[in-house]
Structure formats: structure tokens, C-alpha cells
Amino acid sequence: MMIKTLLLFAILLLIPTHVEPVENIFPVQVDTDKSLHIKKAMEFISSNRPAEAIQILSGYKPSTGELSFYHYAYAKANELSDKQHDSIEHFRLAYIYSQQGEMKELILLERAEAYLKMGCYSEAVMSFRVFLKIFPDSHYVPRAYLGLGDSLYKLGFFNEAIVSYEKAGNSSQALYRKANALQSMGRIKEAYNIYMPMIGRDSGYLKSSEDTLYNIGENLRQVGKFSDAKGYLNSIKTPSFKHRADMSLGLIVMEEAKFDVAIKYFNLALQSSDRQLRRRALLYLASAYAKSGRQNLAQSKLLEIRNEYPYGKDYDAAILMLSQFYRKGGKVDQAISLLKELVLRRSPDRSALDEFEAIILETKDRDAEGFLKLWGAVGYWLLEPSRSQSLLKIAKGLRHSGKPFLDVCIWLSKYGSDDAKAQSRLSLAEFYADIGDAASAARYLLGIESLRHWIKGNNDDVLRIKAKIHLVDAKYQKAAESILSIKDVKQEDIVLLSDLLGLTNNTRKALDFYEKALNRLGGPSSLYIRLADTLYNMGKKSDALKYYRTLISIQPTAPGIADDDIKWALYRISMLSQGKESVDALKRIQKGNDILSRFSSVRLKESDLSERMGRVF
């Protein structure tokens, strides 16, 4: 409608709605003795009788001086007959034969406007630019910029269109259309700031431009003025804009949680002949069904988009939404298959990568084998510095996978965020320390120690790695000193220290640290045995007995304690205690065929024999 308004404005400059003297029709005077046929044709054109005009012109052979006016009249008649291609050719000939002056300017401008009217927007852009280059001082320049802006707007070059509209001046057409371009770019606030004053200044323009009417309604919807938006959108009648308005109205009522009403509007929008509009309406329908709890219907609409409307942003959004349905429904393989379609491109879809990341992190704690397989399939695409924190979590899940773990950590150590670089180097240092490669561990640890600000909050982790490196290098004193410097002690520290008991210069200090940590944190049975045995070897037998007893006392609540540790603790209790406690300990370990069981049987027999001898004597 906006294009029609522009063309009507152009035509009215030359073709009045009532019959005027022919001398008023042409911008320049024509010799009436030589142009009666042309004048008569123009009278028919001005009376909206193009067929009769064409009949006259087709049978007339113009003189050389009449050629420009002849072809111009033919162009106008073809234009009224909706023969745009023919009109373009006659405008071209009219321009060639015309003399310099206003007539020549107008012919070239109207030829550009004819291209715009017939939808040849690229040709229109070129023609308007040619006009502006040839006639930069013409009084038709604002009109040319307006046409250029409209052509660029139709091509989607909104920034360039805005520049052209600004050069067209401050007319209602120029300002409203500039706002339309801003709205199309998503510059909602700027468009709103033009629309509102213009409605007060010239609301009548809206009656001639349903494009602008729709854009104002959509703008008001996006700024949250739903009531005002409905008024504009409901006033649209032209089918091409009516279907777009229906979709906007559906979005408004969906915000109001009126899902059934929204579904009706989206179904109305589906009747559009615009394929892109139908695809988007299906996407919104799926969203409305999903929000109203009708998941199966939502999925059916998404599948319809996938099968019948491939390509484009709305298609990608539908694939992503469908993959989310599959993931939540436990169909992870199907979700992954869909996401690969969005990821395995030259420019992977970031939302799809986010979904992949979510699936991988969920799988990490649920299915170790599936997690490793999934990472191998799509992990490469997630290697981005912005995902550093998630990649650290993934690396933790890959800790025992070998090469995949090393690949992620090495990548993070080079390209991750500063925190991720330090954390990944620490993980690499720990990995190599655990496998006995002290040199590699030390190399990665050296890279961390330059990051003083990071070490300050992670010093305990660094100390643990140092302890492991010193232990590999048989530097037991340094290993123990590193552990004893740890502030937030964990069970793994007690385990590491247990290997050092009796190997350091200050066994007492290490033992005190070990004992306090074990009493506070607990641990596997081997830690209690190790502490008790060390105390026993130091001659602190009463203290040793205490920890052997502790191990036996926690057995009922710790069923994972090794049988050998239980038997050893009972054996030591039998050796360090007297009377009933010693005998009970021996009875508990005599069943079996191992050396401790046989030894306990012998001790029980000795005890029984001693008791009998005591009664005899």
C-alpha cells in the first residue's frame, strides 16, 4: 500500500483526476499542429482510458520532434494498463529523445519509480542513483531519495534506507518510512520516538499506508503497550498485512496467557501466501501449544517446519526447540542428531552449542561411557574461551579417559580464561604427578606459580601437587612439609601422609597432624591401621590400641572395611588387651584358614590350657 501511495503521488503530478487542457499535462509546451494525436492520447490517459490512448498511439507515426512525448504518453498508458515492462521501455526511449530540462528529469525519475512499482528493487536502486548523479540540483531530488529509500527498504538494506529517508526531508512520508526502517532493524525505541510525534502531526497518512500501520502496532507491542497495539493491528484490512497483524495479536494474547486465543490468531496467520510468515506462525503455534501443556501438538508443528520449511532462522529455532523436547523426554540420541544439523556448519549455531553443552554436562554424571562418546562426537565445537568454566567441569569428568582429558586441559592451558589456564595446568600437573612423571608435573606447576593472584586462593591444591612430586622424587621430608602446610585438609591428604609416616625427621608432628585430621574427617580402614601401627612401632601401645578399637567400632556402619584390616586390628587388640577382650578378639578371627586365624586358634588353646592349670594348682 505504501508503494501504491508513492506512485499515486507521482502520477498525480502529471495526470489530474479530471480532464485538463493538454498543455497542462506536459511539463513543456508541444506544438499543437504536430501533436494532436499525442494530446488526444494524453486526454484519454488523464481520463483513465489507457486502451483508447494505446489505440491512437499505435496507429500514429510521430515526427522526430514528437518522439519523446510520444513514448512518454505510451509509457503512461502502459503503466495504467499494468504493463510495467512495456512502460519501462517507453520511458527509456522517451528519455533518449527528450531535450535537456525538467521533462528529461521527470522521465528518468518516473522510470525508476516504475521499476519500484513492478518489484524490481535492485534496478530501481540503480535508476534512482543514476538520477541523483545526473540531476543533483533537480527539485525532484527529495522525491528521488524517497523512492531510493523505499527500494532499499524492500531489499532489506535498512541502514542505507534510513540515510536516504533523511535526505528526502521532513515530510510525513520520509519520517514515517524512516521509522519503519528503524522498526525493521529492531531499533524499537528510536522508531517509537518518531511514531508518537508523527501520529499527532499527521495521523491521516496512516490511512494510505498499512505497512506503517502494522509497524506502529508491532512497535507498541514490543514496548509493552498492548492495548494501543491491538487498536492499530485490528484496523488493518489488506490481507498481506492482516496476516502479519494476526501473528502480532497472537503474541500479545500469548503474553496474557490466553493460549487458546493465541492459537486461533496463529492459525489465521497460517493462511498467508507468504511462506516465511507461515513458517514463523508454525513456530509460534508450537510455542503456544508447549506453554499450554500440549507437548505432542507442539512437536507436530515443529516437525512440520522441519519437513516442509527447511532453512532460515525460524527453521533453526524449530530444530533447537524440538531437540529440547527430545532431551527432556529422554531421547538424547534424537536430540543430538538434530543438534548436529545446526552445529556441523561453517558457522555453528550458538544456541545449539549451548544445548550440546547442557546435554554433555547432564550426561557426565549419569552415563560415563555415553559422556565420553558424546564428547568425542561434538566436543571440538565447544572449544571456545567463553565456555572455559564448563570445559573445566567436562575435563573433570574426563579425568580417567587419558587422551581426551589431556586434549581438553592442554587446550584450556593455552586458550582458556586466565582462571581456566591456571586450573587446567594444575590438573595436568596432578595427572603427571599421579602417573609418576615428576618432570612434566613440575613443568606445569611452574606455569601456575607465576599467577600469584590465582595461587593465593588455591594454595592448598598447589601444595598437594608439590607433595606428590616430592614423593615421586623420594624427597619425603619436603613432601611431608607440603602436606603439613595445607589449611583445608581432605581425606586425600591423610592418605598421602600415611605413606610418609616414619619417613620424616619430625614424625611426631606428622603424626599429630594425621591423628587430628583422621578424627575429624574419618577415612578408609587402612588409614586407621596405618596410624595404629605407627603408634605401636613407636612404643605408644595404649594409643595404638585406641585406634585398633576405633576401627572395630566403626565396622557396623562402614561395611566396606576390608576383612584383612578387621582381622589385623582384632589380632593387635588380642595382643595389647587382656582378659575377655583379648579372648573375644581371638574368637572373632579364628574362623578361616589364613595365618592369623590359625594363630588365634593356637592362642585360644594356650589361654584355655593356662586357665585349667590355674584351677589345678
Image: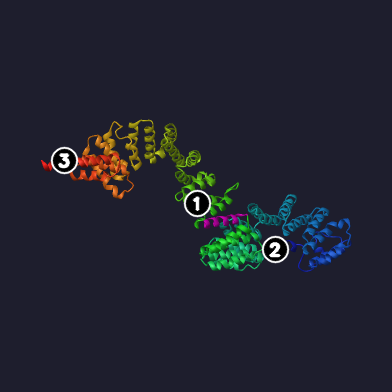
Q: Nearer the viewer, residue 182 or 12?
A: 182
Q: Is residue 317 magenta?
A: yes
State the image coordinates of residue 530 (x, y, percent, origin top left). 29, 38
> Which residue type carries mark 3?
Ser
State the image coordinates of residue 131 (x, y, percent, origin top left). 74, 52
Q: Is residue 18 magenta?
A: no
Q: Quadrant where the N terminus lies?
A: bottom right
Q: Which quadrant of the view contains residue 143?
A: bottom right
Q: Which mark is residue 5?
A: 2
Q: Which comes before the other along the chain, label 1 or label 3?
A: 1
Q: Which comes before the other along the chain, label 2 or label 1?
A: 2
Q: Which residue is mark 3?
A: 610
Q: Main secondary structure of the magenta part?
A: helix
Q: Which mark is residue 282?
A: none
Mark 3 neighbour class, 10 Å CA radius: few under 14, some 14 to 19, many 20 or more: few
Q: Which comes before the other along the chain, label 2 or label 3?
A: 2
Mark 1 neighbour class, 10 Å CA radius: few under 14, some 14 to 19, many 20 or more: some
